[in-house]
Every structure is written in structure tokens, then in C-alpha cells.
Amino acid sequence: MSDLNWVAAITHLRTCREPGVLVTVATVRGHAPRRPGAKLVVGPADTWGSIGGGNIEAVAIERGRELLGKTEAEPELMEFALNDKVIGEHGVQCCGGVVTLLLEPLPVVPAVAIFGVGHVGIELARILARHDLELHLIDTRPDMLSAERLAALSDAVARIHVHHTPLLPEEVLEQLPAGSHVLIMTHDHAEDAALCDAALRLGHFDSIGLIGSAAKWSRFRSRLITEGGHDPATLTRIKTPIGLPEITGKEPAVIAVGVAADLLHAFEHRPITG
């Protein structure tokens, strides 16, 4: 058991992109080892905090680990009677009270990387910033990532990571967590092509999206095959055009709504496991 407090433990799990379960003493009737509000965080390999030890804590840890393996786990309650007539799996606790625990799954949140924070990119960032996720904003142009321009994201729910990459934006791809959703929409078609090539070679992203027309993709596809050595089947991992086909508007905010909606659909149907 680590000596991190439960708040720091949740932050640690999120940073490491590991799932967890927050266990809280919800109610106590009579005598119990801990008061209501005591917390325990259960991770894949470690725990933080305590709800009183003994059978209660051991069972909560076991159930928490079971929930870690479920893709759509829901919060649940567990009740324990603490008397000598109840023999728990891990021993007897005879404090005399009754304890109810609340177990809340802490899933790994999605990660999205927007390469190119231009007119569409900033509108998309505005929408995605309202959701609980890791949002990476990457651009070679410092003015696209200025504090004034990103001020609209100051109250974001998402945790935002800003990457200014003046030379090789594809190097940021190597820093992204596995399972990220990558969106390629820079101002430079050569940069877009290099990012497509690098993303395909890494191979661990949940989705790769490329903004642009059918003509643009035709040129990219030919280059990725002839110069990049990718086979046609591999190229199907790149979705282009991005967004929902039913939304046909060309305005940046309209395109961003379609792309965000498509991403949210992907989040619901591709559970995040870290």
C-alpha cells in the first residue's frame, strides 16, 4: 500500500493511464473501524488509503479488482455486518456496526491529439475541452498556440497538453499514449502526409483521421504505397474525410461538430483500457 493520499492516487492513475476504483465508506450504523467518508483507491497493482483494514478492506480490494476488468462497470454498494456471527472470507470483524461501501470505477479517459490548431482545430478543441479526456494540441506555428488564442479553453474539463513543434511534429506521435485518437489537420499537406506515414508505422492508435478531399487522399494514398511501403489494407486505418457524412457544412464550427460527434460515438463503442 502506497502512502499517497487518495486524491494524489487518482491523479497518479490518470497520469499513468491505468484504471482504478474509488472505495468510500458511505454509511456507518453503530461502531466501525472508520467513519463515513474514509476512502481507499484500488489500482491494478497497488492500493492507496484505507477504509479500516480487515475483512471489509480485503473484500473491497478484491471486488475493486474485479471491476477493473469490466469495460462498462457501474458504481455499486456493498454492505458489511460487523459482528461475531458473520465470518468473512478474510476473518471476523466484531466492532458491532454495519458499514456500507460505495465503489466507483475510475476508467481510463480517452486521449485525443489534434495536429493543426487552425480554424477547424481550435473549434474542435473548444468542443472536446468540455469532456473528460486528455486533449493534445500540436502545431508548428507558435501563434496558433498562443495564450490569447487558447484562452477560450481556460475553463476546460479536459486536461490539455500543448505541444509546439517547429520542426518535426510527427515526433509527438511517439509521446502519445497507446489507444489515442489522432486527428491530422495541419496547414501543410506535406506535414499531413508525414504524420499519416508515422502514425501508421506506430500502429497503436485507436483511430487516425485525416481532414481533406477525396483528391487529397488519392495523392496521399499513392505516395504512402509507393514511397512509404504501406499495403492497401493498412491504409484503411486512416479515416478520411473525418466527421459524420450527414453533416455537410463547410464552416469550421460545423466541421468540428461532426468530427466531435464521430469521436464521441467511437468512445462509446471502443472501451478504453489504458
Image (cartoon, rainbow, N blue to C red):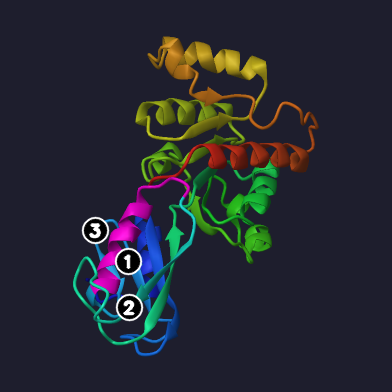
Whichever of callouts 2 and 1 sits on the residue coming sooner in the sequence is: 2
Q: Quadrant of residue 11?
A: bottom left
Circle 2 residue? 51
Q: Earlier in the sequence, mark 3 or mark 2?
A: 3
List x then y, in percent, for residue 195: 47, 31
Secondary structure at numbered mark 2? loop
Residue 25 belongs to magenta span: no
- Tell me the residue at 60%/35% (across/down): 185
Q: How many marks?
A: 3
x and y percentages locating residue 240 in the rendered image: 60, 24
**Image check: 94 left or right of 24?**
left
Q: Quadrant of the N terminus?
A: bottom left
Q: Is residue 63 visible?
A: yes
Q: Amino acid at mark 2?
A: Ile
SS assignment at label 1: helix
The image position of residue 159, as x and y in percent, is 52, 59
Per the rendered image, the range of residues in magenta is: 55-72
Q: Which residue is mark 3?
A: 45
Of mark 3 and mark 1, the one earlier in the sequence is 3
The residue that appears at 26% across and 78% down in the rendered structure is 85
- The front one of 44 and 212 is 44
| Residue bearing the label numbered 1 | 60
